[in-house]
């Protein structure tokens, strides 16, 4: 299972690089990180007490996903303010 997870991580990393500019791989990465954190909390909660535990590393990775998500966002269309004409 660990080898499959490692291979999946490598493939997700390649996907993030190859599809740069697309935001869905970031969403996928974030959802997988949340899923892995829930899995650890349910099935191996003792791991959450160790240094560099899944909570701290996954939360840091989620923050990076959020930063990349915001950086990849298309800027909102900027419109000049309308000028009110006085009569």
Image: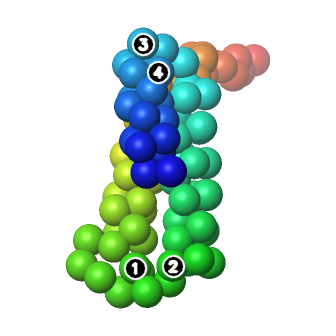
* Rendered image coloring scheme: rainbow
Disc 4 from disc 3: Cα separation: 5 Å
Q: Give SS at disc 1.
A: helix
Q: Give SS at disc 4.
A: helix
| Front: mark 2 or 3 | 2
Residue 52, compared with residue 85, is above or below; it is below
- Residue 71 vs residue 52: left or right? right
Q: Residues within 10 Å of mark 3 (few under 14, many from 20)?
A: few
Between discs 3 and 1, the one toward the N terminus: 3
Q: At x 48% / y 35%, what residue is drawn?
A: 8
Q: At x 42% / y 62%, what residue is drawn?
A: 59
**Which mark, residue 44?**
2
**Which mark, residue 18?**
3
Q: Give SS at disc 2.
A: loop
Q: At x 59% / y 67%, what residue is drawn?
A: 39
Residue 15, compared with residue 10, is above or below; it is above
Residue 83, compared with residue 37, is above or below; it is above
Closest to the observer: 73 or 10? 10
Q: How crowded is mark 2: few (under 14 residues within 10 Å), some or many (20 or more)?
A: few
Q: At x 33% / y 73%, what residue is drawn?
A: 53
Residue 64, compared with residue 53, is above or below; it is above
Q: Residues within 10 Å of mark 1 (few under 14, many from 20)?
A: some
| Front: mark 3 or 1 | 1
Between discs 4 and 1, the one toward the N terminus: 4
| Front: mark 4 or 1 | 1
**Which mark, residue 39?**
none
Q: Name the residue under label 4.
A: 15
- Contact (Cβ within 8 Å) of mark 1 with mark 2: yes
- Contact (Cβ within 8 Å) of mark 4 with mark 1: no
């Amino acid at each position: 299972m660990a080898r499959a997870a490692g291979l999946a991580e490598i493939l997700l990393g390649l996907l993030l690089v190859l599809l740069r500019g697309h935001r869905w791989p970031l969403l996928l990465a974030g959802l997988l990180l949340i899923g892995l954190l829930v899995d650890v909390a349910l099935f191996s909660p003792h791991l959450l007490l160790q240094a560099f535990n899944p909570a701290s590393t996954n939360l840091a990775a989620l923050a990076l996903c959020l930063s990349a998500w915001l950086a990849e966002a298309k800027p909102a269309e900027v419109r000049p303010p309308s000028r009110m004409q006085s009569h």
